[in-house]
């Protein structure tokens, strides 16, 4: 058995200062230790996939990150593991507890995942080993992880068994997060006919996001492809998978790089998929984060099947979740207000747009790692 301090301090010496995750009783000592230390950062995520995407954003910004989760939630992280960290080659340290391990009595819901946890990591091509149970083993384990991540630029897993870490008391009764009474604005009173196209909305966003001062993250599907087709700039990242994770990645990046305005361009389907992350962004989101949802009430890139957003008020939801400013409407002024506001906390813009895309829409000719390397070079960060 080890003390939480022994591992966290060894990891800190290697540059790991950001932790994101969802609690498990096995992880409680780690979480408590990180929360107690004001020099470390803990982000309590709505689910394990968002935690992993937030850690990816932190790593892109130059801050090494650790993701913590219970194996029962490993399924929630499959998409960002396989189509975000793997595709873009983002190194992360994943600590996953092994509830329901073979031969260990546990609750019935852990039985199957306990049997297949190691195989899940193998299937996702994430090398793993048992989390160190003795203090003297910690440096070697962290060095093996560091060597692999430095060489391959991909995640490395540590599987934590029951009874690995001794108790550590939580000294803080709250996370110290701000309680915001954000502003809610409706930018226009009449429906625009016809609505803006996605291309028109993206042109406005480009005009409001200077190359030197901003980072633009585009959600998967037509949004990223259209942004690439209009103007392929070094400050842009095109998500090609991990649907719904653009906003959580943006949170990690905004926290890591407070001197840059980080603009997430989301879609209505993606926002619905991980709506719980609105609460995480509202709680942890810094002043330099702007979250835009372009809502055409459809899954456009798969045939324009309708979403349920015709009756969804994203802006009031964002306000209730703690965003500093939430704006909605159908005019370009929605984007101007959100991107130029000086309200404290993250800003949210809900813009209704038309379905459809530009003719002969291209796919990016640059690979995801090339796009990421270009962005990181542009902002001066490295893994």
Image (cartoon, rainbow, N blue to C red):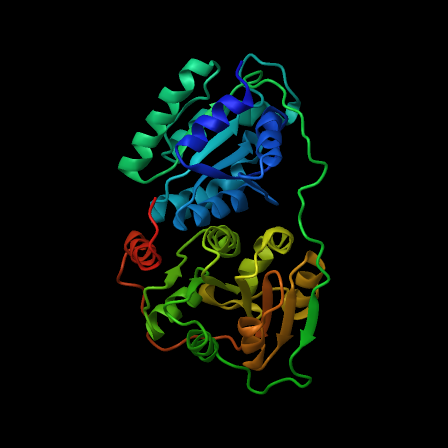
Which of the pair 109/56 is nearer the observer? Answer: 56
Residue 117 appears in view:
no
Residue at 31%, 57% in the rendered image: 371
Which of the pair 257/55 is nearer the observer? Answer: 257
Residue at 35%, 68% in the rendered image: 228
Locate residue 58, reporting x and y percent: 45, 47
> Does residue 51 appear to the left or right of 32 in the view shown?
left
Locate residue 226, reporting x and y percent: 39, 71
Residue at 47%, 41% in the rendered image: 78
> Does residue 216 appear to the left or right of 149 in the view shown?
right
Query: In the rendered image of this protein, does residue 290 appear above or below residue 174?
Result: below
Residue 249 appears in view:
yes
Query: In the rendered image of this protein, does residue 129 appear above or below residue 259?
Result: above
Locate residue 33, reporting x and y percent: 59, 30
Query: In the rendered image of this protein, does residue 40 appear above or below residue 230?
Result: above
> Does residue 184 appear to the left or right of 304 in the view shown?
right
Numbered disc total: 0
Q: Quadrant of residue 151?
A: top left
Locate residue 2, reporting x and y percent: 52, 16
State which quarter of the image contains the C terminus.
Answer: top left
């Amino acid at each position: 058995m080890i003390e939480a301090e022994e591992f966290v301090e060894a990891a800190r010496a290697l540059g790991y200062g950001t932790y994101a995750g969802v609690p498990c009783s096995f992880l409680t000592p780690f979480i408590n230790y990180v929360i107690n230390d004001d020099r470390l950062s803990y982000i309590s995520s709505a689910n394990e996939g968002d935690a992993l995407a937030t850690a990816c954003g932190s790593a892109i910004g130059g801050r090494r990150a650790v993701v913590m989760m219970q194996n029962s939630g490993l399924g929630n992280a499959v998409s960002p593991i396989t189509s975000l960290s793997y595709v873009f080659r983002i190194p992360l340290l994943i600590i996953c507890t092994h509830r329901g391990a073979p031969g260990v009595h546990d609750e019935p819901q852990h039985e199957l995942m306990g049997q297949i946890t190691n195989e899940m990591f193998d299937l996702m091509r994430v090398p793993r080993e048992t989390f160190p149970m003795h203090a003297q083993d910690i440096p070697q384990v962290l060095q093996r992880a560091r060597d692999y991540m430095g060489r391959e630029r991909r995640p490395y897993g540590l599987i934590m068994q029951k009874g690995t870490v001794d108790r550590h008391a939580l000294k803080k009764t709250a996370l110290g997060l701000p309680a915001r009474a954000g502003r809610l604005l409706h930018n226009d009173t009449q429906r625009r006919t016809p609505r803006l196209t996605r291309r028109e909305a993206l042109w406005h966003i480009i005009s409001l996001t200077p190359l030197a001062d901003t980072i633009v993250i585009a959600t998967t599907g037509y949004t990223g492809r259209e942004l690439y087709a209009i103007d392929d700039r070094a400050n842009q990242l095109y998500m090609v998978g991990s649907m719904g994770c653009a906003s959580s990645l943006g949170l990690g990046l905004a926290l890591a790089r407070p001197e840059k305005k980080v603009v997430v361009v989301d879609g209505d389907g993606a926002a619905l998929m991980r709506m719980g992350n609105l609460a995480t962004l509202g709680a942890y989101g810094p002043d330099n984060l702007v979250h835009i949802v372009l809502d055409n009430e459809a899954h456009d890139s798969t045939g324009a099947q309708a979403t349920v957003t015709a009756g969804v008020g994203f802006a009031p939801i964002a306000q209730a979740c703690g965003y500093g400013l939430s704006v909605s409407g159908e005019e370009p002024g929605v984007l101007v207000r959100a991107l130029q506001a000086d309200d404290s906390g993250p800003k949210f813009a809900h813009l209704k747009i038309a379905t459809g895309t530009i003719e002969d829409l291209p796919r990016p000719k640059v690979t995801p790692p090339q796009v990421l390397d270009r962005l990181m070079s542009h902002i001066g960060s490295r893994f």
